[in-house]
Image: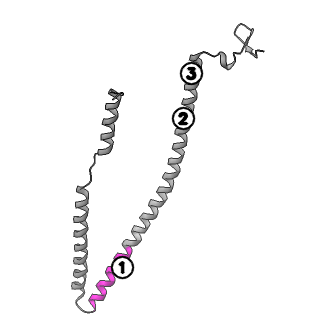
């Protein structure tokens, strides 16, 4: 028994075709539509997850920033304490100069280490470029 669809343009009721009577084109169209819907939903889910993770990362970065500032303040006050401690055994100007020289040495060492590490950084993603070349070669000759 065929189910009846709403009235057609002519006003007559048209029977709906069962699933097994649909043409290949109609089935492919339906599959394509379903895949597009699925893809859109996956993209929306990914956007929501990325937004949530970005929010968490932002809060964590803020805490790292606060910790960095607190660490800076600790070093500042420890440096002042060192200056005042040395000022008990020598002139205050010399004590400040000695602490400043210690910080200059620490800065120079950190600069040299950072510069050496920066030279090892490659801005070009080597592995990605290689796999893209392999993919392009496969696309040209998929049977090899």
Magenta run includes residue 117:
no
Number of marks: 3
Q: Quadrant of residue 28?
A: top right
Query: On screen, 49 above or below 134?
Result: below
- Percent position (x, y) of residue 115? 23, 60
**Which of marks 1 and 3 precedes in the sequence?**
3
69, 143: nearer the viewer: 143
**Type of secondary structure dominating the magenta stretch:** helix
- Percent position (x, y) of residue 141? 33, 27
- Label 2 sits on residue: 40
Considering the image in quadrants, where does the N terminus appear? Answer: top right
Q: Secondary structure at mark 2?
A: helix
State the extent of the magenta-drawn residues as a range. Answer: 73-88
- Percent position (x, y) of residue 78? 34, 80
Query: Closer to the camera: disc 2 or disc 1?
Result: 2
**Which of marks 3 and 2 precedes in the sequence?**
3
> Disc 3 and disc 1: Cα gap in Å?
71 Å
- Label 1 sits on residue: 77
Marking on residue 29? 3
């Amino acid at each position: 028994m065929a189910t009846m669809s709403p009235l057609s343009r002519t006003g007559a009721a048209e029977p709906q075709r069962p699933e097994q009577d649909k043409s290949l084109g109609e089935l492919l169209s339906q599959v394509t539509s379903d895949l597009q819907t699925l893809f859109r939903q996956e993209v929306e889910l990914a956007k929501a997850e990325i937004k949530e993770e970005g929010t968490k990362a932002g809060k964590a970065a803020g805490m790292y920033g606060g910790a960095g500032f607190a660490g800076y303040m600790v070093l500042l006050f420890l440096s002042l304490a060192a200056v005042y401690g040395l000022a008990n055994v020598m002139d205050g100007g010399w004590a400040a100069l000695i602490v400043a020289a210690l910080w200059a040495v620490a800065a120079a060492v950190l600069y040299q280490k950072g510069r050496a590490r920066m030279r090892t950084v490659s801005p070009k993603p080597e592995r990605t470029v290689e796999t893209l070349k392999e993919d392009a070669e496969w696309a040209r000759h998929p049977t090899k």
